[in-house]
Image (cartoon, grey):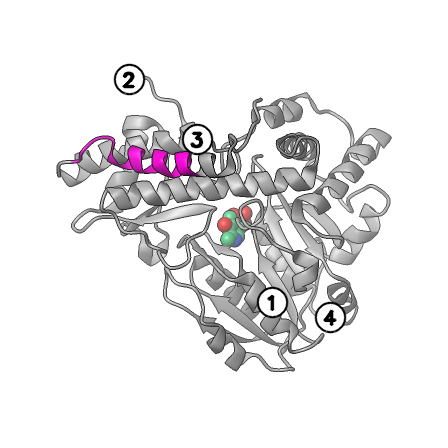
Amino acid sequence: MLRKGRLFTPGPTAILPAAQTAMAAFTAHHRTADFRALFTRVLADMKDFIGTENDVLVLSSSGTGVMEGAVANLTSPGDRVLVLTAGKFGERWRDLAKAYGCAVEVVSSPYGETFSLEAIGKKLAPDVRAVYVQATESSTGVRHDVKSIAKLVRGFGDNTLLIVDAITGLGTTHFDVDDWGIDVIIGGSQKALMIPPGLAYCAVSELAWMRMEETKSPRYYFDFRKERKAAAKGESAYTPATSLFAALGAALDFVREMGSGDLVAGRKALIDSAELAAEMTRAGAKALGLNLFAASAPAAALTAISAPGGVDSSAMVKEFHESFGAVVANGQGEMKGKLFRVAHLGYYDYLDTIGILAALEHVLARVSGTDVEYGTAVRAAQQVYAERISRDNRVTAVVST
Ligand SMILES: *Cc1c(COP(=O)(O)O)cnc(C)c1O
């Protein structure tokens, strides 16, 4: 049968067609009034997308670039920092902080689990200069409780900054960035924003701007102060990925449409959509007798599903691709072969969700050699959907392209 290539990976994600056209048509030079207008509009819209009054920066790099910037700009060599890690992206924070000479302390949890707030409380102290955490750990499918973590950190006063890698959290999780006191929250273009990789963004609090003035770590391209100054004039310090800004403008317009003209409402609708797709996916997987890898605190961004006993998830990933053109993600590092990850962040709808579950039924039958009652996962997901629709008394996301 014909196969359409589709990404179900937690980045890059499916691309919004309107963003693709906007990119292809875009030619403006970055030091022109046309580009400044686009840049200024995108930065203003990004505040609504993130849900903050803080300054937003959009840089041309992958997400890790801005993660590195959030270490270089906010810590000096020898600073005591606390990294909360429960997966591959948490480990990235740890390694980045070490690379910049921080005295790194760690609160860790096993893959597939989130942190005990008590353990975090024990490690916090007034001389901890920064706390680094993920909102959603994309390697395990876990959602961390950022609100409670922020409350703990804020209890230690203004010397301790909270930096959240929400690269798959933004657009899939409700945050109250300013009220909770998140000092830096980071996102990436290739996740819920539905555009290709190449832009990373963050919102920065006043406390964090003040910290940058005293920081001793070297910075150049990722000197956030330089970007802030340039942004005030509608520009980026260096050549920005101009066509990606055009794509981002189109993506933000799409989210605004999801909110019937209100970007904040659109962001909420996008999050609710991911949550519903995640709930459907979890119900489908469970109905097939599969175990969820992050059962206790599952993210809406993606669902990590353990391969059944005796089955290598690599074979499942391969089968998804070969039979259905669907790219799902394998486990990373030590988790390779043990689980597979299905993303639903950004441009994913009901048919994508039902389609990947229907494919899962075939993949499971083929790879595990067991009998699968076709329709099991699909039916469970449909039930979740039907219940939600009757509860909300409406079709969830009414948008077309
Ligand atoms: C995708 C992702 C990143 C960033 O990865 P890049 O490849 O540098 O864009 C960081 N953290 C999380 C949680 C992610 O999902």
- Marker disc for residue 215: 4
Label 4 with label 3: CB-CB less than 8 Å: no
Q: Mark 1 vs mark 4: which is more N-terminal? A: 1
Query: Rounded to the nearest whole Å, what is the CA distance between mark 1 and mark 4?
Result: 22 Å
Label 1 with label 3: CB-CB less than 8 Å: no
Task: Give residue 132's position: percent from left, percent from top.
Answer: 57, 66
| SS assignment for the magenta stretch, majority | helix
Which quarter of the figure is the N terminus placed in?
Answer: top left
The front one of 126 and 242 is 126
- Marker disc for residue 350: 3
| Visible residue check, residue 239 | no
Residue type at mark 4 is Thr
- Marker disc for residue 1: 2
Between label 1 and label 4, give the one nearer the viewer. Answer: 1
The front one of 385 and 24 is 385
Q: Mark 3 vs mark 2: which is more N-terminal? A: 2
Q: Secondary structure at mark 3?
A: helix
Residue designated by label 1: 150
